[in-house]
Structure formats: structure tokens, C-alpha cells
């Protein structure tokens, strides 16, 4: 039986013959429907985050597994963790069918490579403190299912996202996340509704994870890496707003702390740069706790 993501939806019969404005409106409505479908999965996403946090607090890593469109969406989410939240790049692993070359050039046959999946998990050295997030629209992709099974056998926490019910990937995962987006406007083109839903779920999962791990303070990405002029200006604004400081004082504190926003805020409370780093380390980067200590 075909998964829902591969079926034909009669509503879109002859869509290629429709006027462009009509076709675009129908495609847009399908995207809205895909986004709405995520709502039912919010409890499952929250549970997966709750289970992931203790492992990552012990030094574990986040790994993503996928093939084709799903792999590219996973890679984007993983790549954004470091500049946005200061998550160490060494603690993000990408297990992609066809390797990194598949990010820019489709290698559809790679999704059947079970041996490659086993090798990818072994090379990543996944273990008990690691979290594997496996993504496949159909939930049946051989590479992705094998990655999840291999990671599970090594003790990693397994989270799976699929867009079709009764998927083997969901059955095998400790934390299954189903987002039933149904048939696509163009049958089997899961870069459309399924892909949109996958991007939303990964955004939600990784953002909530970073919230719980202390990488956000008062709605600001205080662990971002200020690697260019735009981001340095943003860091100055954050310190100004959070410390009620002037621009020159904020910039001075940032320059003394290698542009670390959290440490700069403690410096403006009277700490030395070295003490600020020590206090933050003692509280595992929790700025609320660090400020509470300084203000006692």
C-alpha cells in the first residue's frame, strides 16, 4: 500500500493546465494545510525535547539522518545551530544518504544504501548521550530507517519524523512525530507539503531544545556568534537593552569578553571577564542563574 505522501490527489488533476494565479493559490493553500498539520504533533515534539535535554546536558550530540529533500532540510537545521545559538559544531552530526555531495546534487539511489547508513552511524560514533533525529516523508526510506535502528542499538535516543501513518520509522523510534500532510499537489513531490512541515517541526524542535539548554535569554539569542559587522551591532544592541547600558559601555564590555553577550552582561555587573566566564561555566551557561549569583 502506497504511503499517503505518494498518492494522487484528485483535487489537483490537470493542475498544469490551470491559469497561473489559480495554480499558485491552490499550491499556497496546500502549504497552509501542511503548516496547520504540525499542530497535532506539538505534544510529541515537546516530549522529544524533554527526553533529549538530559542527554545533551551530559555532553551528548545532536545527529540528523535523512535522504533527498529530508536530508537537505536536516542539514540546514543543523548548520544554523552554531551561529544562532553558539551550539558547538563538533556536537552536530549529519548522516546524509549520498554524503554531503547530495546536498547540492540529487542522488536518489543513495536512499536505499543500508550499508552506507550503518557506516555513517559507526563513523559518527553515536552513543548513549546522543540524540538522533531521523526524517523521511514516507517513513520507509531504507537509509534513514537503518540509521535509526543502528543508532538505537548503540543506545542513542531516537526521534523520528514522518508524514505518513504506520511508517516503520515511527514504529522503531523512541519518540515518533507524525505530521500527516497527505497527498501532494504534485503526486510524490514531498519537497512541497511534507517538506514544509518537516522544516517547521525541525525549527520547533531545535529552538525549544536551545531554549531549554539556556541558549536564549529574554527572547534573545545571547549565545550567537558575532562573526561580522551586522552581528556585532546586534550584540551591542542586546547588551544595551538587557543591561540598560550605553552603546560605548556595551561595546567595551563585549570587546573585553571576545564578543560573548552573556559574559559582557556580567562584566557590566562588575565582574572581570575571567570571573564572568567562571560563573557562567559553574551554571552551565544559564544566564538567569549567573545573574542571580552576581546580584546576591
Image (tube, rainbow, N blue to C red):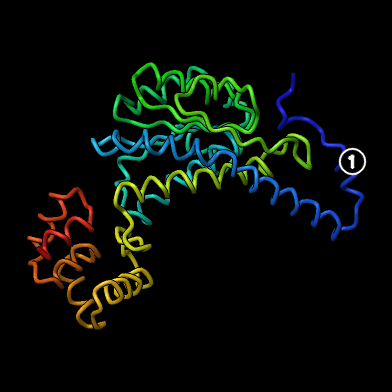
Q: Quadrant of residue 83?
A: bottom left
**158 versus 249 height, above or below:** above
Q: Residue at 46% across / 30% down in the picture?
A: 159
Per the image, label 1 sits on a secondary structure element best described as: loop
Asked if residue 98 shows in the view, the reply is no
Q: Provide the residue designation for mark 1.
A: 13
- Residue placed most toward the observer, 179 or 18: 179
Q: Residue at 30% across / 47% down in the picture?
A: 213
Q: Position of residue 31 (x, y in %)?
A: 70, 50
Q: Residue at 84% across / 61% down in the picture?
A: 21
Q: Quadrant of residue 46?
A: top left
Most distant residue in the front direction: 296
Q: Position of residue 253 (x, y in %)?
A: 17, 73
Q: Position of residue 123 (x, y in %)?
A: 35, 25
| Left or right of residue 74: residue 267 | left
Quadrant into which the C terminus falls? bottom left
Asked if residue 86 shows in the view, the reply is yes
Amino acid at each position: 500500500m502506497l504511503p499517503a505522501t505518494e498518492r494522487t490527489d484528485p483535487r489537483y488533476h490537470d493542475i498544469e493546465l490551470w491559469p497561473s494565479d489559480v495554480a499558485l493559490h491552490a499550491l499556497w493553500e496546500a502549504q497552509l494545510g501542511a503548516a496547520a498539520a504540525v499542530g497535532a504533533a506539538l505534544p510529541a515534539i515537546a516530549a522529544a525535547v524533554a527526553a533529549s535535554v538530559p542527554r545533551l546536558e551530559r555532553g551528548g550530540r545532536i545527529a540528523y539522518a535523512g535522504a533527498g529533500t529530508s536530508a537537505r532540510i536536516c542539514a540546514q537545521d543543523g548548520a544554523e545551530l552554531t551561529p544562532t545559538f553558539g551550539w558547538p559544531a563538533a556536537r552536530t552530526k549529519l548522516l546524509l544518504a549520498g554524503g554531503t555531495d547530495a546536498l547540492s546534487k540529487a542522488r536518489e539511489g543513495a536512499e536505499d544504501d543500508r550499508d552506507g547508513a550503518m557506516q555513517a552511524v559507526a563513523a559518527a560514533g553515536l552513543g548513549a548521550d546522543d540524540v538522533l533525529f531521523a526524517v523521511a516523508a514516507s517513513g520507509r526510506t531504507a537509509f534513514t530507517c537503518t540509521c535509526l535502528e543502528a543508532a538505537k542499538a548503540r543506545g542513542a535516543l531516537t526521534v523520528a519524523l514522518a508524514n505518513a501513518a504506520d511508517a516503520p520509522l515511527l514504529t522503531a523510534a523512541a519518540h515518533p512525530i507524525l505530521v500527516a500532510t497527505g497527498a501532494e499537489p504534485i503526486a510524490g513531490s514531498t519537497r512541497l507539503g511534507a517538506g514544509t512541515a518537516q522544516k517547521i517541526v525541525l525549527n520547533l524542535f531545535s529552538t525549544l531544545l536551545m531554549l531549554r539548554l539556556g541558549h536564549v535569554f529574554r527572547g534573545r539569542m545571547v549565545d550567537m556568534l558575532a562573526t561580522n559587522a551586522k552581528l556585532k551591532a546586534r550584540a551591542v544592541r542586546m547588551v544595551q537593552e538587557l543591561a540598560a547600558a550605553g552603546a560605548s559601555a556595551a561595546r567595551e564590555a563585549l570587546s573585553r569578553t571576545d564578543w560573548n553577550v552573556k559574559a559582557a552582561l556580567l562584566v557590566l555587573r562588575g565582574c572581570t571577564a575571567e570571573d564572568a566566564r567562571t560563573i557562567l561555566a559553574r551554571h552551565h551557561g544559564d544566564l538567569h542563574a549567573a545573574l542571580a549569583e552576581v546580584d546576591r
